[in-house]
Amino acid sequence: MLDWKIFAVGSAFFAGLTAVLAKVGVKNVPSNLATLIRTIVIIIFLAVLVGLRREWKNPFSIDKFSLLFLVLSAIATGLSWICYFRALQTGPASLVSPIDKLSLVFTIILSVIFLGERLGAYQLLGACLMAAGTLIIILK
């Protein structure tokens, strides 16, 4: 089984690639339509992946608590994409993406508050540096 860190780096790489590709894609398309097209492609891609891996399960047979939080996560993702595509449509990718990556800092803060995760000194320093780095990039 591959280490989670490999998938995390893959996530970061593909998120970076997404910003560049999406910036070109939303140039002449309304941002909400672009988000819908992206979502349809993702649904088809994941349906094929789940089918090939034989992972299909009736969503209503999943634990209700887990299903609720997956639905809430999906709504948060949708809102994030809508905001992201609108920002990309009107702003430069080189500035939109770093601001979007403040999600790292928000994730750390929210995981401490809601999941009870503890931060070590290096994690706290890293989060502060991420926030400072974003400010350095976006401020003129």
Image (cartoon, rainbow, N blue to C red):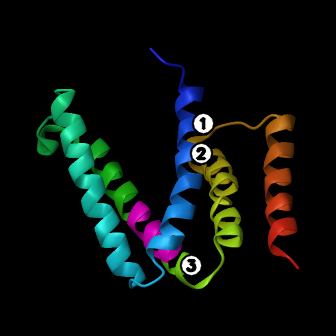
Q: Tell me the kind of residue under disc 1.
A: Val
Residue carrying label 3? 87
- The residue at which mark 1 appears reads as 9
What type is the residue that disc 3 sits on?
A: Ala
Who's the residue at 60% across and 28% down the image?
5
Q: Is residue 114 above or below residue 136?
A: above
Q: Is residue 52 above or below residue 123?
A: above
Question: In this image, 131 relative to 34: left or right?
Answer: right
Quarter holding residue 35: bottom left
Given residues 130 and 18, the one toward you in this image is 18
User: How packed is label 1: few (under 14 Cα within 10 Å), some, or many (20 or more)?
Assistant: few
Q: Earlier in the sequence, mark 2 or mark 3?
A: 2
Q: Is the N terminus in the top left, top right, bottom left or bottom right quadrant?
A: top left
In the image, farthest residue toward the top: 1
Q: For mark 3, give the secondary structure.
A: helix
Residue 55 horizontal/vertical position (percent)? 19, 30
* Magenta segment includes 83: yes
* Residue 136 as seen in the image, left or right of residue 6: right
